[in-house]
Amino acid sequence: MSERNPLVAGNWKMNGDAASLDTLLDGVLSELSVLALQRCSVLVFPSYVYLGQVANKLRGTIVGVGSQDVDERTQGAVTGGVSAAMVKDVGCEFSLVGHSERRTLFAESDELIAEKFEQCKACGLVPIICVGETLEERRQDRTMEVVTRQLNAVTSRVGLAGFDGAMVAYEPVWAIGTGESATPEQAEDVHAGLRKCLAELDEDLSSRTRILYGGSVTADNAVALFGKENVDGALVGGASLKANSFAEICKAAEES
Ligand code: PEP
């Protein structure tokens, strides 16, 4: 039996407000209480401004909370910046780093993302490093080259001890928010390649690191995706904004 229990994370992006997120959380908690999950962990990633509110509401529940990003610096004259220590201070335990929207909209480089990852670890946050190729890169048969470059930028900066405990999310850019998920076979190919890449660092680390799939995951395609050996759960965007569809995905992960 795999030592990697599944995990489902909802990336709420720049959606919602105080009232609607409170209602969404009520719905998620109520749906999850019916499921009585034993194996599947569940996380949500609200916008910075709602992190404290959400963390307070989720304290003592089975749902963890994380930020969608952190600044690479520790403190000081960084107007608009939010440090990993601040995120930790308001009750978060996780953070995404290197989401494709950060890479594209904010021109974040592999090196910058590695610095953010390192800040998370230094402050006691569990980072989830997102990697993924564009459609053009896939068509050029460069998927593994791109995702291993993105992953290696982090591992070469932080090393084995610095990576331990982190998670990876494979999110093909062409599948994010498009309604066109990778097939289970496409996801498994890349996840197996990423695991091999981690095994070059350390076999044990590789076998215990969770690799999530993200990109148009829905209640309909989750079962098939989670049926693959190296798919350890999902990072879910759109479908995490509806309590029932998010819970259905958690159920699929629980039963995988
Ligand atoms: C995401 O942005 O991380 C994501 C996977 O979005 P969606 O599920 O909407 O494709």
Image (tube, grey):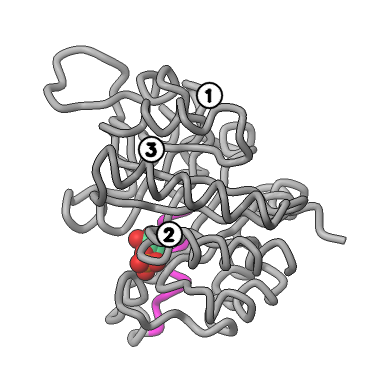
Taking the spot 87% from the left edge, 61% from the top edge, the residue there is: 1
Residue neighbourhood size for the residue with mark 3, other residues' Cα within 10 Å, grouped as few (<14), some (14–19), many (≥20)? many
- For the residue pair 72 and 250, the one nearer the viewer reads as 250
Residue at mark 2: C-beta within 8 A of ligand 1:
yes
Residue 56 appears in the picture as rendered? yes
- Residue indicated by mark 3: 67
Circle on res. 124: 1
Q: CA distance from mark 3 to mark 1?
A: 13 Å
Q: CA distance from mark 2 to mark 3?
A: 15 Å
Residue neighbourhood size for the residue with mark 2, other residues' Cα within 10 Å, grouped as few (<14), some (14–19), many (≥20)? many
Is 168 placed above or below 114 here? below
Please give the range of residues in magenta.
141-151
Is 191 placed above or below 35 here? below
**Which quadrant would the C terminus be assigned to in this image?**
bottom right
Is tag 2's residue or tag 3's residue first in the polypeptide sequence? 3
- Is residue 208 covered in magenta? no
Quadrant location, ligand no. 1: bottom left
Q: Amino acid at mark 3?
A: Ser
- Residue indicated by mark 2: 240
- Residue 179 placement (x, y as % from top left): 35, 80
Q: Amino acid at mark 1?
A: Gly
Q: Amino acid at mark 2?
A: Ser
Is tag 1's residue or tag 2's residue first in the polypeptide sequence? 1
